[in-house]
Image (cartoon, grey):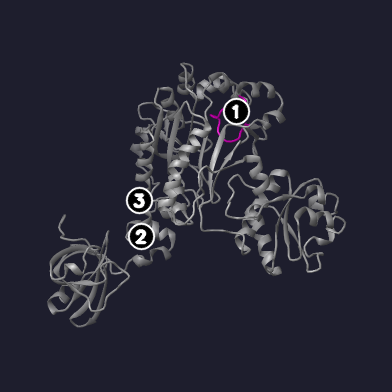
């Protein structure tokens, strides 16, 4: 017995028949059968219980109560004549002697039916999220989230990691996304920033002599929403290890995550540890993505040498990538839809060709491949019934477009997508540098805090030579699960001299490094241990475990796609005196 009840709504069984009990919860439904007879469903966190009204007195009490009001029911448990085997309490019902309203719902019409809230418009669901969460199917994701977070904490603690919280108000840092800024009242014109990640703090903890750190860390980034990314804030299992190598981090995360997938995951199979290691360049060549979905058995092949000079304009001077499938029976309309979808997603056009029953190329651009047919067929190991979809362009664009083709073909053509599993791998050997798409200049590719493979010598050997700099790999790694980046990490650059040299390559000198990362730079000059870490995303992990397609389904109070909290009406305007207090004047352009 606890609170004002003797039992919860998921607890009563046939063994309780004859007992006088008190249950409390939300009035989910009332079904009147006669003038003095009705079936009611009472729901709480734990389940539902049927309450049967059999007299005029109780009917007068229950009839004016709106659905979703909270009530207390005291009465006798008895065996049900018509049992419901689908619920744990389906063998009993409660005949009330007393019904009391605890919290009245003052609305005759709800924004949506609670048990069907997932069918409602998303913005309506978010505005009335407290009603949406009453739906057991919605609530179950949040319960699972709590269980998984508790399991992660347990497993990390068992491995000797200390849970240490790091500051929320900190300095702005170039992490690759826009900061959320907080004005400092006592320091006019200056701002705190909400951390995009605890990156510098966890590295400082290693420098401070802590050996193993973790936290379920809130991170804040002013970036656009996607199905697998929520705007505003998200949570990650942030971890770092001193005197550690890449293999130390990867094996630790495998030991932690595999049991979580096995215990809480929707799918029956999980990749066994150690996970497969795929170098970045290989991933782009074979899968067209640095986050490949390995549940798909198709791979990309390079046909550039075979088709050059065939007379098809888009191939001339470009890289050409192809994805082939056998036993293809789809109609031309299906192919046209595929091409449209590829172009919408990538901005690039795709082309195609089929092999007929006689082994001849037909359809699409087949007329351009007449002279290279034999080499083309041999290269792709084609046979009657094969279908080939191709992408052309600069190498990177051709790879990425072919990656989209691979995914679409794999999921749309039967027999190539083994969905019921968690297919995990490590993407390793990321390039240290890249040419920025907007700037056209050399930039850090993934993480500026990573140790370049080869250390100082690799940087010295490549200094002044862009091609050599682009060839330097970093000790960086991503965990990929079913086509989603699920964790990212690196062996850190703990040597201030190597750090300065790495930043010099992108046009930033020692003074810039000191200015941007003063605490970390100075700390490293006092003797820093080699250290490495990673950060699996908690929200994305829960999304994968539940099989949900939108990350907002596993966040208790998510924002919408426009980074608005419709329930709390945030962001919102503030009073002028609040702006004056923090020395801010608005300059809003129409």
Tell me the quarter of the image containing the N terminus: bottom left
Is disc 1 surrounded by few (<14), some (14 to 19) or many (20+) residues within 10 Å?
Answer: many
Nearer to me, 294 or 137: 294
Q: Residue at x 37, y 50 (%)?
A: 145
Disc with the residue nearer the chain's start (2 vs 3): 2
Q: Which residue in the protein does label 1 denote?
A: 452
- As drawn, the residue found furthest toward the right would be 371
Point out the stretch of residues depicted in magenta. Answer: 443-454
Secondary structure of the residue carrying tag 3 is loop
Q: State the residue at coordinates (78%, 48%).
A: 304
What x and y, as percent, mark residue 575? 34, 41
Q: Callout 2 environment at 10 Å: few (<14), some (14 to 19), or many (20+)?
A: many
Q: Looking at this view, is 268 or 49 the one in front? A: 268
Q: Dot 2: what SS? A: helix
State yes or no: residue 60 in magenta: no
Measured Cα–Cα span from mark 2 to mark 3:
15 Å
Q: Can residue 263 be seen in this view?
A: yes
Q: Name the residue under label 3.
A: 568
């Amino acid at each position: 017995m606890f609170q004002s009840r003797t039992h919860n709504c998921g607890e009563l069984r046939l063994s309780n028949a004859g007992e006088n009990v008190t249950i409390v919860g939300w009035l989910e439904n009332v079904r009147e059968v006669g003038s003095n007879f009705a079936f009611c469903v009472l729901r709480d966190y734990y389940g539902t219980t049927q309450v049967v009204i059999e007299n005029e007195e109780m009917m007068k009490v229950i009839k004016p109560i709106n659905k979703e009001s909270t009530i207390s029911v005291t009465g006798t448990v008895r065996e049900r004549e018509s049992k419901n085997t689908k619920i744990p309490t389906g063998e009993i019902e409660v005949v009330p002697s007393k019904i009391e309203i605890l919290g009245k719902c003052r609305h005759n019409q709800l924004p949506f039916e609670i048990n069907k809230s997932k069918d409602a418009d998303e913005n309506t669901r978010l505005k009335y999220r407290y009603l949406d969460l009453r739906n057991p199917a919605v609530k179950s994701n949040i319960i699972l989230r709590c269980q998984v977070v508790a399991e992660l904490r347990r497993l990390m603690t068992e491995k000797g990691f200390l849970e240490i919280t790091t500051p929320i108000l900190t300095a702005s840092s170039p992490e690759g996304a826009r900061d959320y800024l907080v004005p400092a009242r006592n320091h006019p014109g200056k701002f705190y920033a909400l951390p995009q990640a605890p990156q510098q703090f966890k590295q400082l903890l290693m420098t401070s002599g802590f050996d193993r750190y973790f936290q379920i860390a809130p991170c804040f980034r002013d970036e656009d929403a996607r199905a697998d990314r929520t705007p505003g804030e998200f949570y990650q299992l942030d971890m770092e290890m001193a005197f550690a190598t890449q293999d130390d981090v990867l094996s630790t995360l495998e030991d932690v995550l595999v049991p979580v997938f096995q215990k809480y995951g929707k799918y029956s199979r999980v990749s066994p540890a150690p996970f497969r290691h795929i170098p970045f360049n290989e991933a782009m060549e074979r899968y067209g993505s640095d986050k490949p979905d390995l549940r798909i058995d198709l791979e990309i092949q390079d046909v550039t040498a075979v088709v050059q000079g065939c007379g098809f304009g888009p191939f001339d001077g470009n890289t050409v990538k192809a994805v082939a499938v056998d036993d293809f029976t789809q109609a031309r309309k299906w192919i046209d839809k595929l091409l449209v979808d590829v172009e919408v997603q990538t901005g690039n056009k795709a082309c195609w060709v089929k092999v007929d029953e006689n082994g001849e190329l037909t359809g699409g651009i087949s007329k351009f491949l007449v002279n290279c047919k034999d080499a083309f067929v041999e290269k792709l190991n084609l046979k009657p019934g094969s279908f080939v979809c191709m992408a052309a362009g600069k190498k990177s664009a051709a790879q990425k477009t072919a990656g989209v083709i691979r995914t679409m073909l794999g999921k749309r053509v039967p027999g190539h997508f083994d969905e019921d599993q968690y297919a995990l791998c490590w993407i390793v050997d990321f390039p240290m540098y890249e040419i920025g798409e907007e700037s056209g200049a050399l930039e850090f590719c993934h993480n500026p805090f990573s140790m370049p493979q080869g250390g100082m010598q690799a940087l010295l050997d490549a200094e002044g030579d862009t091609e050599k700099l682009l060839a330097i790999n970093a000790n960086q790694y991503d965990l990929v699960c079913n086509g989603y980046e699920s964790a990212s990490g690196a062996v850190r650059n703990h040597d201030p001299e190597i750090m300065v040299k790495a930043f010099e390559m992108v046009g930033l000198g020692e003074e810039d490094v000191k200015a941007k990362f003063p605490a970390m730079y100075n700390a490293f000059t006092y003797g820093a241990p080699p250290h490495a870490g990673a950060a699996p995303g908690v929200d994305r992990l829960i999304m994968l475990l539940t099989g949900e397609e939108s990350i907002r389904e596993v966040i208790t109070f998510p924002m919408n796609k426009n980074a608005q909290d419709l329930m709390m009406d945030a962001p919102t305007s503030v009073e002028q005196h609040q702006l004056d207090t923090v020395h801010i004047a608005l300059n809003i352009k129409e």
